[in-house]
Image: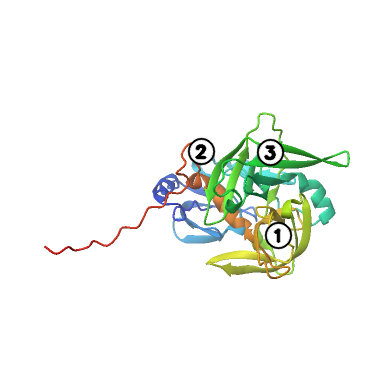
Amino acid sequence: MLRACLKTAGGLAFILCALTASATTVQLKDKAAVTGKILAEKHDQIIVDIGYTVLVIPRSQIVKLLSDDVLPSKTALATPAPTAAMTPDLHRFFYNSLANAKDRTVRELVSELGAAVVQVRTPSGLGSGFLINEDGFLMTNFHVTEGETQISIEVYQERNGELERKNYKQIRIVALNKFADLALLKIEDKDAPKFVHVMLGESADLAVGDRVFAIGSPLGLERTVTEGIVSTKTRQFQGDLYLQTTAQINPGNSGGPLFNMRGEVIGVTNMKITFGEGLGFAIPVENVKFFLDHRDSYAYDNDNPSNPYRYLEPPSRTKKTAE
């Protein structure tokens, strides 16, 4: 609904505000819609001016945002949603699950989604990742690719009951956010097929005690599945909130998906407490969606080694010299 212009990077805030000056229609889960001007957008809510009042709308209630230039007719808005298991958002290039998705067993979900989870290799180590669309875009952690430009992706697919692996070496870094520990990559090998991909859910729909499972490559052991529950949804570290889970997370799991029992990604695994067991943590999927929606603000220029960040020394105090 709300196209936020406050939650942006640096001077780009002004550009986004200019783009969102026109009316935006917010479609809600209950099939209602609100049209107005977006004032601000945060990772968990958006704020929209509808003329006579200002509404604060939780992201968990939003299906999609439609601006004036892509707004379909009223007839189209009234058309029932498709019955497919997943549907692309018009403003995004990832997939959100439909509300009627049902719980299934870990065995069923791993068989269906395992091929969407990949291993990310660099000269200095390895991690995990997951494909967000059929065109080869994938998510992982920033710290998995930090300081690296030579990256390869190993994709696993089951054929005739056997695990078949394919290695892709033409990998482009699309966007990076060091502070959110997120990285967006793309497989660009000429022989790359259409990939199996995941759906993104809502961590806001989780409750403490809900079952979850992770797929990744801990210690290089590809396609390892671990299951657990959500221990807490609001574990705070250095000002950021994380999902805490009893699903085992180890080095090599970083960047991999944490799934709910509907097969939706609800977090990105990125750390654990080394001196304890069952103390794993994941970045909430709402942070991932915000990063993807604003990926141009975090774009990486492969031709400029100074990107994506260049930190300048703060100005020093003027020293007075005796005359």
Residue 214 seen from this side: yes
Q: Going by the picture, which residue comes out furthest to the left?
A: 323
**Disc 3: CA contacts within 10 A as few (<14), some (14-19) or many (>=20):** some
Report the side of 67 relative to 315 (left or right): right
For the residue pair 244 and 205, the one nearer the viewer reads as: 244
- Mark positioned earlier in the residue sequence (3 or 2): 3
Q: What residue type is labelled 2?
A: Asn
**Residue 46 percent coordinates (x, y):** 52, 57
Q: In which quarter of the image is residue 88?
A: top right
Q: What residue type is labelled 3?
A: Glu
The answer to whether 238 is drawn above or below residue 225 in the figure is: below
Label 2, label 1: how many angstroms apart (C-alpha)?
30 Å
SS state under label 3: loop
Report the side of 92 relative to 85 (left or right): left
Label 3, label 1: how many angstroms apart (C-alpha)?
28 Å
Residue 72 seen from this side: no
Report the side of 238 relative to 228 (left or right): left
Q: Going by the picture, which residue comes out furthest to the top?
A: 190
